[in-house]
Image (spheres, grey):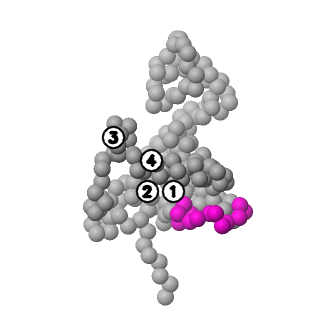
Amino acid sequence: MGIIVAIRSFWGALTDREMNARLAMVLADFSAEQCDNQADYHCEKVDPNVTPGRSDAFELLSALQREARFIDFIKESLAERDDATVGAAARAVHDRCSIVLERCFEIRSLTNVQEGELMTLSREEAGNRTRVQFTNRTHVAASISGRVIHAGWIAKKFSIPHWSGSKDDESVLAPIIVEN
């Protein structure tokens, strides 16, 4: 479900100035408080002077930047850009990010049932909170039926490039590019 929220937030931030401002406030609040509740966020307080080891998250972010200019797009201020320019840039970044994610994860739908169609789940299937979320569950029966609002996502593989650089450069996501 997190990827859907991320995509909606991303597109909302691109196309709706009010939503962009609200997201910026929420993210600022979240960044300031995220480690205060470690049970919810599973995070540790990090010393800003200590460089973390090169993680898979860094590798994925680096690949998204290298192949799709994702960080450039997200970090650029869009306030002065017209919608047509933002839309053209978003389309290119979207297409290339999709290629990277497909190569690294082979993302597939959790079900063959199409959004808007009726789906019936056994009690056991309905009880799996990782795979199924209900918008309104008032009773427990032998089976549960409802309309699919979102078909879910599953990664069929995990294949992130491996870091081969030096320890000093572990946190570098993209190099400086100099024209000479």
Rate crowding at label 4 as few (under 14), some (14 to 19) or many (20 or more) other CA atoms within 10 Å.
few
Residue 123 on the magenta segment? no
Mark 1 in CB contact with mark 2 (< 8 angstroms): yes
On screen, residue 45 versus residue 175, left or right, reads left
Figure quadrant of residue 15: bottom right
Span colored in magenta: 72-84
For label 1, the residue is 100
Q: Look at discs 2 and 4 and give the one toward the viewer.
A: 4
Who comes first in sequence, dot 2 or dot 3? 3
Rate crowding at label 2 as few (under 14), some (14 to 19) or many (20 or more) other CA atoms within 10 Å.
some
In the picture, the disc for residue 30 is 4
Q: Which residue is found at the position 38% from the left and 37% from the top?
A: 40
Report the Cα–Cα distance between label 3 and label 4.
Answer: 13 Å
Figure quadrant of residue 151: top right
Report the Cα–Cα distance between label 1 and label 2.
Answer: 9 Å
Report the Cα–Cα distance between label 2 and label 4.
Answer: 22 Å
Who comes first in sequence, dot 1 or dot 2? 2
Report the Cα–Cα distance between label 4 and label 1.
Answer: 28 Å
Report the Cα–Cα distance between label 2 and label 3.
Answer: 24 Å
Rendering coords of residue 30 (x, y %): 44, 47
Rendering coords of residue 89 (x, y %): 64, 63
Residue nearest the observer in this picture, 175 or 153 = 175
In the picture, the disc for residue 60 is 2
Rate crowding at label 3 as few (under 14), some (14 to 19) or many (20 or more) other CA atoms within 10 Å.
few
Callout 2 amino acid: Leu
Tag 2's secondary structure? helix
Rendering coords of residue 12 (x, y %): 63, 50
Who comes first in sequence, dot 2 or dot 4? 4
Q: Look at discs 1 and 3 and give the one toward the viewer.
A: 3
Q: Which residue is found at the position 58% from the left and 49% from the top?
A: 22
